[in-house]
């Protein structure tokens, strides 16, 4: 039995699901059904059991079932490190997302203390060829999985930077207006950079310690416009020195918000962006598995994995290797695909769920 898993999941008026209920154990979950039936909606609900906006980064009002628009609710029993927690997540129509843990109201970041959830979705297949923002978001999700407080640092930094950028756009030149904001940016920026580098070290270690059918990715944190200064004092000095240049640009030009993640297919020495579509997918799978292995050690249990359309771009051999690694890890992995044949190699090592749609209503049926 997995050390971290959901033993029940219920949905009410969430996305395409008017109502759905699943009773589960710690094994992987193979979810199949036609396109548009609501498979991704099901695992998006699970992604809400971690801090943040979920795997599609949707606003609460965008998750409500239409046309009723009555609000939505997701509940589940989460087993984490020998403890069980009743989780309720909901939003009333037009309202913000709310959370209760064991009957008590809680902030989203509280989920980071009891759960770890990782995901790989089709939109991430473009990670290596899209802009740097997507790679920063990916790296920050990895970092948050090891250091939940990383989310606070990012939010604080972004808030201070927005205020500084407003001053820059208004052409405010009095240094006194900048000092407090730059001090906060320097402190939080140094924390963000250090946490990201620590997360990359964990990924490198997890990849080097495992024999796997998936390629190793060499990762490096780079910058789009000059290197991030080391430490808060150096960054604060760099912000002050860059103020005139930033005034011309109307925005802050140095800091962790300018970082990029460079990946290389280690065995071939080829940048990830130049690899084939299949190789890029395999590199992503490798990183998710490395993240999961590292968390199994640091958190004490493997994370819940959400793998949407995971079989895409994987041949039968790598698909079987992926399932073998998931089972060996002991992770409750929620995997979606269009047909049951995509999960044939799993057999009874997994729970099987079919999602269908009739008359505009999704139906979730354990098999």
Image (cartoon, rainbow, N blue to C red):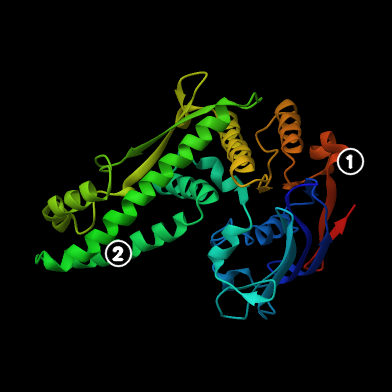
Q: Which residue is mark 1?
A: 348
Any part of residue 307 in sight: no
Q: Which mark is residue 252?
A: none
Q: Quadrant of residue 212?
A: top right
Q: Quadrant of residue 323?
A: top right
Q: Residue furthest top?
A: 268
Which of these two is toward me, 187 or 351?
A: 187
Any part of residue 217 in sight: yes
Q: Which mark is residue 160?
A: 2
Q: Quadrant of residue 329?
A: top right
The count of marks equals 2
Q: Residue furthest left?
A: 174
Question: Counting other residues with Cα less than 10 Å from the Cα at mark 2, is it few (<14), some (14-19), or many (20 or more)?
Answer: many
Residue 202 at x, y percent in the picture: 51, 37
**Is 292 on the left or on the right of 343, as rendered?**
left
- Residue in the picture at 22% in, 59% down: 182
- Residue in the picture at 51% in, 55% down: 148
Which of these two is toward me, 186 or 358?
A: 186
Measured Cα–Cα span from mark 2 to mark 1: 52 Å
**Is 124 on the left or on the right of 303, as rendered?**
left
329, above or below 110, in the image: above
Which sits earlier in the primary sequence, circle 2 or circle 1? 2
């Amino acid at each position: 039995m997995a050390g971290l898993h959901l033993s029940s999941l219920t949905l009410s008026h969430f996305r395409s699901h008017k109502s759905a209920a699943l009773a589960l154990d710690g094994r992987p979950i193979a979810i199949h059904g036609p396109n548009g039936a609501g498979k991704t909606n099901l695992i998006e609900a699970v992604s809400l059991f971690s801090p943040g906006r979920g795997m599609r980064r949707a606003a609460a009002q965008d998750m409500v079932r239409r046309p009723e628009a009555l609000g939505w609710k997701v509940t589940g029993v989460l087993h984490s490190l020998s403890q069980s927690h009743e989780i309720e997540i909901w939003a009333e129509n037009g309202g913000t997302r709310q959370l209760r843990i064991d009957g008590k109201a809680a902030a989203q970041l509280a989920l980071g203390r009891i759960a770890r959830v990782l995901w790989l979705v089709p939109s991430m297949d473009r990670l290596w060829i899209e802009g740097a923002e997507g790679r920063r978001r990916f790296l920050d999700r990895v970092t948050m999985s090891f250091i939940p407080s990383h989310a606070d640092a990012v939010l604080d930094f972004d808030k201070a930077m927005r205020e500084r950028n407003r001053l820059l756009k208004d052409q405010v030149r009095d240094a006194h207006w900048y000092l407090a904001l730059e001090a906060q940016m320097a402190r939080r920026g140094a924390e963000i950079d250090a946490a990201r580098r620590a997360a990359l070290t964990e990924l490198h270690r997890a990849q080097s310690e495992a024999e796997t059918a998936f390629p190793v990715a060499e990762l490096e944190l780079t910058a789009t416009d000059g290197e991030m200064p080391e430490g808060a004092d150096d960054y604060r000095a760099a912000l002050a020195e860059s103020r005139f240049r930033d005034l011309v640009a109307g925005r802050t030009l140095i800091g962790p918000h300018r970082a990029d993640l460079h990946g290389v297919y280690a065995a071939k020495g080829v940048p990830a962006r130049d690899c084939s579509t299949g190789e890029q997918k395999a590199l992503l799978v490798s990183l998710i598995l490395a993240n999961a292995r590292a968390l199994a050690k640091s958190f004490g249990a493997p994370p819940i994995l959400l793998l949407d359309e995971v079989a895409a771009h994987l041949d039968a051999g790598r698909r079987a290797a992926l399932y073998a690694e998931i089972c060996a890890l002991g992770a409750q992995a929620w995997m979606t695909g269009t047909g049951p044949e995509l999960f044939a190699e799993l057999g009874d090592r997994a729970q099987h769920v079919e999602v269908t749609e009739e008359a505009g209503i999704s139906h979730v049926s354990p098999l």
